[in-house]
Amino acid sequence: MTKKVSPIPRGYRTATTCLTVFDVDSAVAFYQAAFAAELLTRHRGADETVAIHATMKIGNSIIALNAEAPEQGILSPASLGVCSNQVHLYLDDVDTSWERAVEAGAQVHTPLYDAYWGDRTGILLDGNGYLWSMASKIENVSQEEVARRSQAWYQVDVEIPAEVEIPVAAMMVEETLADDSVAV
């Protein structure tokens, strides 16, 4: 009698993030240094020298890595010159984790700050073009309070001093809108 095979491997969830990277081995080394990732598996290509796939665990989450395959149109965000998504990490101590990631070479995209929804959070950029938002919950905030704080956060009462010049392009847009007879 054969043992039943689980359709979802142990440790995985229904959805697993898979990142395309320049070099799997370098990416694993960076994620180990930056986020204390644990390497689970590594698969090498036909020549047995270059890793083409790996899985790693950060906290309780599994993330897969694939090497770029330009011949198949599979490229990392950095190769495409874009930041198309981000991975969000909830951590016990975001400040310590943040410093470790920056020391490992992550670039600060959005500095750490205390957000109105009760997180201390910020966003880093890795060498493959992926954004990593990191956070620790610092306060439990009701949905009503989040809504109130959100309004205050996004309230913009900026008075432009008279001596500030308005760019020509902005004046052209204002004139076009003033002359436009199309109802919006």
Image: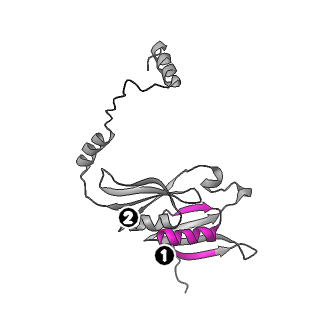
* Label 1 or label 2, whichever comes before in sequence order: 1
* SS for callout 2: helix
Amino acid type of disc 2? Answer: Asp
The residue range painted magenta reads: 15-42
Query: Is 36 included in the stretch rendered in magenta?
Result: yes
- Element at label 1: loop
Q: Is residue 38 left or right of residue 163?
A: right
Q: Residues within 10 Å of mark 2 (few under 14, many from 20)?
A: some
Residue name at image x 52 percent, y 53 percent: 85
Callout 1 amino acid: Arg
Label 1, residues with CA under 10 Å away: few <14, some 14-19, many ≥20: few
- Give the residue pinned by disc 1: 10
Q: In the rendering, at what x and y percent does residue 127 appear?
A: 58, 60
Q: What residue does disc 2 label?
A: 95
State the residue at coordinates (53%, 68%): 31
Front residue of 6/30: it is 30
